[in-house]
Image (spheres, grey):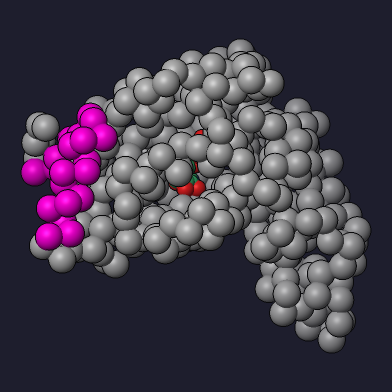
Amino acid sequence: MTVSNSIKIFRTVQQVRQWRQHCLLNRETVGFIPTMGALHDGHCTLVNQSLKDNDRTVVSIFVNPSQFAPHEDLDAYPRTVDTDMKLLSQKFVSKPVDAVFIPKITEMYPSGITLDVANQRGAFVTVHGCSEQLEGVTRPQFFRGVATVVTKLLNIVTPDRVYFGQKDAQQCVVIKNLVRDLLINTEVKVLPTLREQNGLAMSSRNAYLSDSTKQESAVIYQGLTAGATFYEQQKDNGAGKVSSAEILDKIKKVYTSNKDFEVEYIAVSHPETLDDLEYVVPGTGAIISTAVRVPKEDGSGVARLIDNVVLV
Ligand SMILES: Nc1ncnc2c1ncn2[C@@H]1O[C@H](COP(=O)(O)OP(=O)(O)OP(=O)(O)O)[C@@H](O)[C@H]1O
Ligand SMILES: CC(C)(CO)[C@@H](O)C(=O)[O-]
Ligand code: BAL
């Protein structure tokens, strides 16, 4: 166990468990933020909330292979541990995070792992619902991989509270389901999406984009906002329910303005089950979510950006 600027860096499960045991003996609550690194201000809002809510805060940085399909960007995914550590030591002036867990793949997957979607050795936690919708259509391995790694991480850290971002809305639903279904004694907190000034959701994958594409990608949130504004207007006019087709229409009109972007899906879904909704009923609300493929700066293909807005 090494200490850097008072932040403990753990590489093994055993080290985290010892530390957690210590917190328990001292009756200290623990907040946990799982990440894949390449930290940005969106991650920092999760960390800040944990620092406020808990006596101790631990962040994990682990690019989890089992949630990537073989053709996805596992190798290219930004790995910036040194910068991440600087940010975690400098950004939070009142109180730094207590610990960072940076395991190797073998530490997290002691029986090995294969990335073959049909036979995912090592990724075995399935969560009912959600896996065949939205993100699950294009990334069938994603939810099994996320559910597996988050279960492992929660088993290791056993935090009082765990923090996720609304940007990954479907992931949040999957994790809430798994915490409930596997009777895990941790409170799941979901915090709002932090955005760039132009509205683009902050994301580690934004590092793939040129400045001009980042500017143009503002259209993603503009479209979602057009849908949300239409919904609010209908609601204000006293509509008992609002047609999803009409909401989608407003969004699509905005999206046609950019021909280089390929819209993978736009969906109006139930906020808890993520089932497709024909109508949105005020009070129950909905999530409008989207995935858009935009050109990468280095010409090596496309980056897949996801975003969503919540209707109430
Ligand atoms: N803009 C944001 N606002 C709030 N939370 C965020 C934001 N971006 C990511 N998070 C949350 O941070 C946690 C760790 O996410 P991750 O490390 O995958 O970063 P990311 O920016 O989502 O990366 P990616 O580009 O791979 O989607 C997740 O719970 C995620 O939802
Ligand atoms: C939750 C998570 C850390 C699991 O690898 C990842 O999916 C992420 O960063 O959103
Ligand atoms: N933040 C989601 C992680 C992923 O896209 O793999």
Choose between 184 and 79: the one closer to the eye: 184
**Residue 264: image x %, image y %?**
77, 36
Is residue 243 toward the left or the right of residue 95 in the image? right
Q: Residue at x 14, y 40 (%)?
A: 8
Image quadrant of residue 101? top left
Is residue 269 toward the left or the right of residue 159 in the image? right
Asked whether residue 137 is in view, the answer is yes
Q: Residue furthest bottom?
A: 238
**Residue 243: image x %, image y %?**
90, 67
Residue 16 colored magenta?
yes
Image quadrant of residue 39? top left
Is residue 39 toward the left or the right of residue 21 in the image? right
Q: Residue at x 28, y 31 (%)?
A: 102
Q: Which residues are magenta?
A: 6-25
Q: Residue at x 86, y 76 (%)?
A: 241
**Residue 311: image x %, image y %?**
69, 68
Asked whether residue 221 is in view, the answer is no
Q: Residue 80, relative to residue 87: is it above or below?
A: above
Q: Residue 85, relative to residue 116: is it above or below?
A: below
Instruction: Quadrant for the C terminus, please.
Output: bottom right
Q: Residue 83, relative to residue 271: is it above or below?
A: above
Choose between 94 and 176: the one closer to the eye: 176
Instruction: Quadrant for the N terminus, please.
Output: top left
Residue 206 colored magenta?
no
Tally of numbered tags: 0
Choose between 99 and 21: the one closer to the eye: 21
Q: Main secondary structure of the magenta part?
A: helix
Image quadrant of residue 303? top right
Q: Residue at x 41, y 25 (%)?
A: 109
